[in-house]
Image (spheres, rainbow, N blue to C red):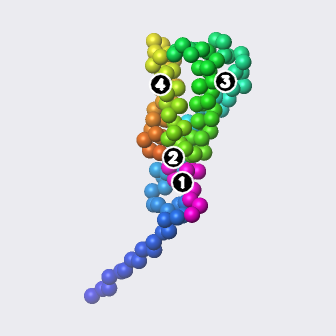
Amino acid sequence: MGTAATFVAHPIPTTMLLNSEPLSEEFGYLVLRVSAGGTMLWQHGWPKLMSFGERMDGFADPFGLGGAFSLALIVFAEVVCSALVILGLWTRAALVPLIIGMAVIVFMVKGDASFSEKELAMVYLFAFVTLLFTGSGRFAIDRISFS
């Protein structure tokens, strides 16, 4: 006759930043946010912002709003919204301009181009849509609670 082992689970406080077992999913959201947002900001948004004056006259104008205004819209998405995505601050709202911008590039600006020419914009589009569905994850400024 043996004795049964007893397991006592200690409750984890729900206010802690790390309060769940499957952290790999949360780290995945963090990596996706930082990599997609970071490369968009550093490789695409920042160069456009730094050369705004030279680019505005010849920039694509798919809606007839003028090259300078179209450039300003995409710079806002690629710089400001990407920074918000990296931080995890207002993530879903910040993703909307990025998704719209990438969809315009894929389907309008490069609509007739070969797949290889619009592949990068499609990768960004899918990454941003994925984040729209999943949210920012636990490691985001949105999730910090000060109460």
Q: Residue at x 64, y 11 (%)?
A: 58
Mark 3 or 1, nearer chain start: 3
Q: CA distance from mark 2 to mark 4?
A: 21 Å
- CA distance separating discs 4 and 1: 28 Å
Disc 4 marks which residue? 103
Residue 136: image tag: 2
Q: Position of residue 65 (x, y in %)?
A: 56, 16
Quadrant where the C terminus is found in the figure? bottom right
Counting residues from the start of the chain, the first of labels 3 and 2 encountered is 3
| Magenta stretch contains residue 52 | no
Nearest the eye: 94 or 64: 64
- Range of magenta residues: 136-147
Query: Which of disc 4 and disc 2 is earlier in sequence?
Result: 4
Q: Is residue 130 above or below residue 11?
A: above
Amino acid type at mark 1: Arg
In the picture shown, does residue 112 fall above or below 139?
above
Q: Secondary structure at mark 2?
A: loop
Q: In front here: 103 or 90?
A: 90
Image-quadrant location for residue 134 = top left
Q: Position of residue 143 (x, y in %)?
A: 54, 54
State yes or no: discs 2 and 1 in contact (Cβ < 8 Å).
yes
User: Does the rendering let one see residue 32?
Assistant: no
* Labels 4 & 1 near each other (Cβ < 8 A): no
Which of the numbered marks, if any, corresponds to residue 80?
none
